[in-house]
Amino acid sequence: YRARNEVRDFRFGYTVDGVVKRWADAVELYYKFVGADWDRSILTVAVTIHPIPGVDGSEVRAWAHGPLYGSIRVPGDGSAHLHVTPLPAKTFWEARVLYPESALPRLARHSDAPRRETVLAEEARWAEEANRRRAAARERVEQKGTIAKLAALAGAAGLVVWLFLFRRHAWPHRPTPTRPPGEIPDYLPPALVGGALGVFAYVT
């Protein structure tokens, strides 16, 4: 291709084998659409998992794993839509989807063991952990906001005090004379009268 100072779109298509597994009571899709080895952040990752024909959407359960601010939507048609903006470097983004066991009857069974309850228990536990992390993150943000407000109030109070002290002590004051210019204070001894006259003459 040829490109210079322009935006180009590239579309890659590939097939991944062995991603969907059939168990005794469920069909499971568990796949990292973006692995944790990317050394660059990605602005937006949008994943659409198309529905399996003939599967009732109410029987489909889906979860997304990755950044806590990512989202997943499962409409009634049995599809799953994952979205995250941005995806930091070295961060994975994956989906886990459960279908009924009859969704792919021709797929060879991965195991005859049940799977659904195990998946539901794992996802419930991980959801609780994610909620605790979200709550802790919100608490940290609230604490930072409170500290910022207190710092702003302290700064404003300090400015008010500074203005008051400046007005009180640093503002230039006009002197108020207590006796007419040139009059010698009566508390000066005779030896200092000459010096006082010189000072008054200089000031005048």
Image (cartoon, helix red, strand yellow):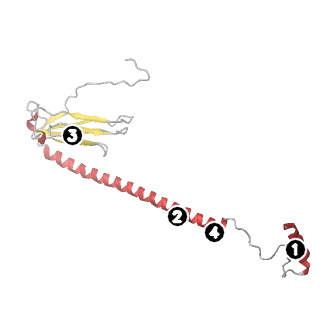
Rounded to the nearest angstrom, the CA distance separating label 3 from label 4 is 71 Å
Question: Relative to residue 128, is residue 92 depicted above or below?
Answer: above
Amino acid of disc 1: Ala
Do labels 2 and 4 touch, CB within 8 Å? no
Label 4 Cα crowd, 10 Å radius (few <14 / some 14-19 / many 20+): few
Quarter holding residue 30? top left
Q: Residue at x 38, y 56 (%)?
A: 142
Label 3 Cα crowd, 10 Å radius (few <14 / some 14-19 / many 20+): some
Amino acid of disc 3: Arg
| Disc with the residue nearer the chain's start (1 vs 3) | 3
Do labels 1 and 3 touch, CB within 8 Å? no
Of badges 3 and 2, the one in the foreground is: 2
Of badges 3 and 4, the one in the foreground is: 4
Q: Residue at x 42, y 59 (%)?
A: 146
Kind of element beneath mark 1: helix
| Disc with the residue nearer the chain's start (3 vs 2) | 3
Do labels 3 and 2 touch, CB within 8 Å? no
Amino acid of disc 2: Ala
| Disc with the residue nearer the chain's start (2 vs 1) | 2
Q: Is residue 27 left or right of residue 180?
A: left
Return the x and y of residue 186 as percentages of the image width and height. Answer: 85, 82
* Residue under label 1: 196
Amino acid of disc 4: Arg
Q: Nearer the viewer, residue 68 or 115?
A: 68
Kind of element beneath mark 2: helix
Marker disc for residue 168: 4
Q: Residue at x 45, y 57 (%)?
A: 148
Kind of element beneath mark 3: strand
Rounded to the nearest angstrom, the CA distance separating label 1 from label 3 is 99 Å
Quarter holding residue 34? top left
Rounded to the nearest angstrom, the CA distance separating label 2 from label 4 is 16 Å
* Residue under label 2: 157
